[in-house]
Image (spheres, rainbow, N blue to C red):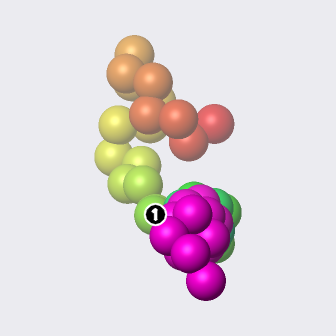
């Protein structure tokens, strides 16, 4: 294995980790600002 393949696998792993974290580990947002003029993104 040369360095280019190793870097490609590292980039792939980072991309997959980012996608998994983005879609499967969503954080719960508090709704204490809902109903006010502030857009909390809960609608």
Please give the name of the residue rendered at 53% of the width and 35% of the height, measured from the top-left corner: 41
Using residue 9 as the reference point, say whether residue 33 is left or right of it. left
Does 18 sit above or below residue 39? below
Q: Taken as a whole, is the magenta stretch helix, strand or loop? A: helix
Please give the name of the residue rendered at 40% of the width and 16% of the height, measured from the top-left corner: 37
Residue 26, x across and y down, in percent: 54, 64
* Total number of numbered discs in the rendering: 1
Q: Quadrant of residue 11?
A: bottom right
Please give the name of the residue rendered at 35% of the width and 37% of the height, measured from the top-left corner: 33
Residue at image mark 1: 28
**The magenta segment:** 1-15
Query: What secondary structure is found at the residue carrying circle 1?
Result: loop
On whether residue 7 falls in the magenta region, the answer is: yes
Single out the residue that lies furthest toward the top: 37
The reply to whether residue 21 is visible in this rendering is: no
Residue 35, x across and y down, in percent: 46, 30
The reply to whether residue 11 is visible in this rendering is: yes
Q: Quadrant of residue 1?
A: bottom right
Single out the residue that lies furthest toward the front: 2
Residue placed most toward the observer, 21 or 27: 21
On whether residue 12 falls in the magenta region, the answer is: yes
Residue 16, x across and y down, in percent: 64, 68
Please give the name of the residue rendered at 37% of the width and 54% of the height, measured from the top-left corner: 30
Residue placed most toward the observer, 24 or 20: 20
Residue 34, x across and y down, in percent: 44, 36
Does 16 sit above or below residue 42? below
């Amino acid at each position: 294995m040369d360095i280019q393949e190793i870097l490609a696998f590292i980039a792939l792993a980072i991309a997959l980790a980012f996608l998994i974290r983005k879609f499967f580990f969503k954080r719960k947002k508090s709704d204490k600002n809902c109903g006010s003029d502030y857009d909390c993104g809960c609608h």
